[in-house]
Image (cartoon, grey):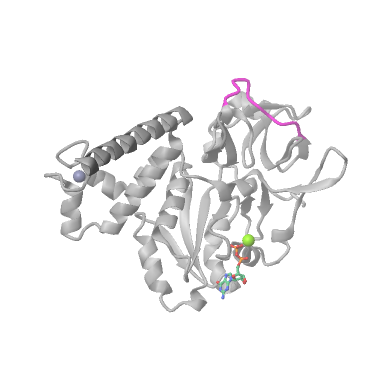
Amino acid sequence: MNFEQLDLADFGWSPFFSSQLSTDDLAELLPVRVMAVHRGGLDVASPSVQTLIPPFVLNDGDDESVATVGDWLLVEPNTLRPRRLLDRKSLFKRRAPGTDRRVQLIAANVDTLMVVSSCNQDFNAARLERYLALAREADVTPIVVLTKSDLSNNSGELAQQAAKLLPGLLVESLDARDPDAVACLEPWCGKGQTVSLVGSSGVGKTTLVNTLSGTTELATQDIREDDDKGRHTTTGRALYRLPSGGWLMDTPGMRELQLTDAREGLDEVFADIVALANTCRFSDCQHQSEPGCAIQVAIFDGTLEADRLRRWQKLAAEEAFNSSSLAERRAKGRAFGKMVRNIMKEKNRGDRG
Ligand SMILES: Nc1nc2c(ncn2[C@@H]2O[C@H](COP(=O)(O)OP(=O)(O)O)[C@@H](O)[C@H]2O)c(=O)[nH]1
Ligand SMILES: [Mg+2]
Ligand SMILES: [Zn+2]
């Protein structure tokens, strides 16, 4: 790939990053973007350099101080030694399974998340809301792309339903194979814009990417990496340039995002319910049959759908469970086991008596 005619803004540089540099930094250091992450290092690029550098971890060494794909680093111009990791505009991360549950970084500085769903069987409000919450938690702007509009006779209605899930949410329904239709997504894929796609298997993500890139090559374009036997192996985790001037963030980690540590994202997507809950008479209102429950009033007068309340309750419970520590889960498990045993005891007593 030839980056020589590009300027920094083409790589996604913006005032958000330049404002983090002092005059001295500007004179002495060179900003580079992490274009790909390999086991052995980072592919970084800027208008003047394109090279592989060793992995970069800040001295304070917490989970988020490791450079990841999409990051901006300041390097020394001659040695290319990394000196600083710039604050991120957005960050997707997840907690590893396993006992230590370390935070793993998935992608930094994504501008737009295309939440892809299809107009046929796949359309599911709860799934969309989960992705929207993940995007908002990461500080990324979500848009919804409903594919296979050509196979559906209610794509307009579905688009309206989707648009109601988050105030200001943009929804496009289209045939992902049609370049003229997909052109409506170009504003999010323009100069320096970084986009990523999520959605279930089969909804048309690969098709969309191929149409956006005007080729079938991009999806099969692999990052090559030497493994320890000197062979080339392929991995994901890279930025690919789109003909419209943007960057496609492709990382397998996006597929495994869970609703963990995503309380703020959920609160944003369900801001309507959170606002109502704040006006319930009791601060621990369960929104069932308590007196003075603002949520039940809203359902009664039709301003809130009962389904949306149920979806929020389910997602909030899922988020709380995923975010709890292993110890908390064990404690919950024990408390639950105890409750079950007590109920059985009561029941046995009742059966005998
Ligand atoms: N008719 C129609 N077929 C589509 C559309 N988008 C994707 N497909 C087809 O759906 C299948 C799955 O698409 P693919 O891009 O592989 O989905 P992915 O798993 O999300 O990457 C393929 O056969 C595509 O040709 C669309 O908008 N209309
Ligand atoms: Mg695919
Ligand atoms: Zn209530």
- The residue segment tinted magenta is 53-62
Q: Quadrant of the C terminus?
A: top left
Q: Is residue 131 visible?
A: yes
Q: Is residue 261 visible?
A: no
* Residue at the image point whose x is 54% and y is 39% from the top: 93
* Residue at the image point whose x is 56% and y is 68% from the top: 182
* Residue at the image point whose x is 46% and y is 44% from the top: 259
Q: Nearer the viewer, residue 260 or 109?
A: 260
Chief secondary structure of the magenta portion: loop
> Percent from the top left, x then y, of residue 341?
33, 36
| Outermost left residue | 291
Q: In the image, ligand 2 is in what quadrant?
A: bottom right
Up/down of 19 relative to 205, above or below? above
Residue 100 counted in the magenta span: no
Up/down of 259 relative to 53, above or below? below
Q: Nearer the viewer, residue 331 or 317?
A: 331
| Outermost right residue | 230
Q: Nearer the viewer, residue 179 or 293?
A: 293
| Outermost top residue | 59
> Percent from the top left, x then y, of residue 42?
72, 37
Q: Is residue 55 left or right of residue 141?
A: right
Image quadrant in which you'd find residue 64: top right
Up/down of 204 relative to 60, above or below? below
